[in-house]
Image (tube, rainbow, N blue to C red):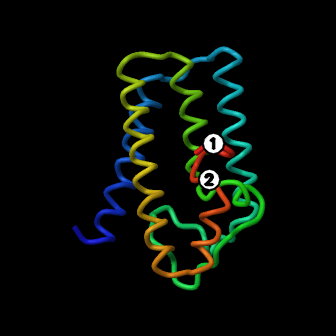
Amino acid sequence: MKSKSYSYILVSLQFIFIAILLIKHGLHIPSIFPLLLFFIGACFGIYALQYNKLGNFNITPEIKANASLITTGAYRYIRHPMYFSVLVIMLGVVVSKPTLLSLFIYALLVVTLFLKAQKEEMLWMEQSNEYKNYRQKTKRIIPFVL
């Protein structure tokens, strides 16, 4: 499969899974814990975006022309802070009203984001020796863990 097609499939799946989770849970007021998870994920995402230039940011795992490697802020600890942010936000949605279906869809979202991260890292490894060093010093998605 062509590289860009695979990237667009992963992005499409990501948004489909997020949409299903949001639609499935509807608009209701969850308890404090899900709201806290949602808030932490959103704040972490905003924090990560402060260190990522708009010209660098890409929703697909493809590397933009003239993109530069970011190793400050949230990127100092994990290579994919935006994926972490999405996972924490959506975990808040799932635990607000957990069902077997929502847990399954969330697991599919986790797999999709890991595949996106893997694709992006493969492209960076081909493009940058600096990335190889950066990869050894940071975790992939979960700070200090994974």
The kind of secondary structure element at disc 1 is loop
Q: Is residue 99 above or below residue 125?
A: above
Q: Position of residue 48 (x, y in %)?
A: 71, 56
The foreground one among 124 and 96 is 124
Q: Is residue 39 above or below residue 140?
A: above
Which quadrant holds the C terminus?
Answer: top right
Residue at 56% x, 43% y is 86
Residue type marked 1: Val
Q: Where residue 12 appears, x then y in whole percent?
A: 36, 52
Kindly check if marks 1 and 2 are in contact, taking CB atoms under 8 A apart as contact: yes
- Counting the numbered discs, the total is 2
3D distance between C-alphas at marks 1 and 2 = 7 Å
Q: Quadrant of residue 74?
A: bottom right
Q: Identify which residue, 79 or 129, lies in the foreground.
A: 129
The image quadrant that residue 1 belongs to is: bottom left
The residue that appears at 63% across and 52% down in the rendered structure is 81
Residue found 49% across the figure and 74% down from its top = 125
Which quadrant of the figure has residue 105? top left
Q: Which residue is mark 1?
A: 145
Q: Residues within 10 Å of mark 1 (few under 14, many from 20)?
A: few
**Is 70 left or right of 146, judged from the image as shown?**
right
